[in-house]
Image (cartoon, rainbow, N blue to C red):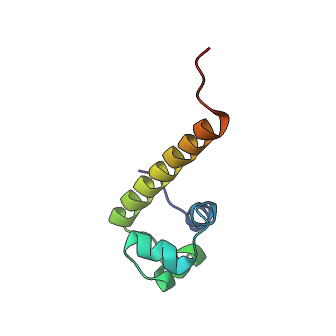
């Protein structure tokens, strides 16, 4: 499990191009809670850290899939 700092959470959200309310909805929390996490006022629970790990992993897999489609998949 990754140690999720406020900067890590902000970076993931911005990479995913999501607003705080949309990111919160994805994780099952409020947009205000995401704001507090990103400001360092609150710390993510163990459960939320696991969810963030899963969301990050899925996002990276989706990005890899986009890259392979972008470049084609030719067998010569």
Could you tell me residue 19's position as x and y percent? 58, 76
> For residue 70, which quarter of the picture?
top right
Point out the residue furthest to the bottom here.
32
> For residue 45, which quarter of the picture?
bottom left
Front-most of residues 23 and 39 = 23
Front-most of residues 11 and 43 = 11
- In percent of the image, x 50 and y 60: which residue is there? 4
Give the side of residue 68 with respect to residue 27, left or right: right
Residue 75 seen in render: yes
Could you tell me residue 58's position as x and y percent? 45, 51
As drawn, 11 above or below 40: above
- In percent of the image, x 48 and y 56: which residue is there? 3
Front-most of residues 74 and 38 = 74
As drawn, 69 above or below 11: above
> For residue 39, which quarter of the picture?
bottom right
Number of numbered markers: 0
As drawn, 13 above or below 62: below
Residue 41 seen in render: no
- In percent of the image, x 59 and y 36: which residue is there? 68
């Amino acid at each position: 499990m990754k140690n999720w700092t406020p900067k890590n959470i902000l970076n993931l959200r911005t990479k995913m191009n999501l607003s705080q309310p949309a990111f919160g909805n994805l994780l099952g929390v409020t947009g205000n809670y995401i704001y507090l996490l990103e400001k360092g006022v609150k710390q993510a629970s163990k459960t939320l850290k696991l969810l963030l790990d899963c969301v990050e992993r899925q996002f990276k897999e989706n990005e890899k899939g986009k890259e392979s489609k972008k470049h084609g998949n030719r067998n010569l």
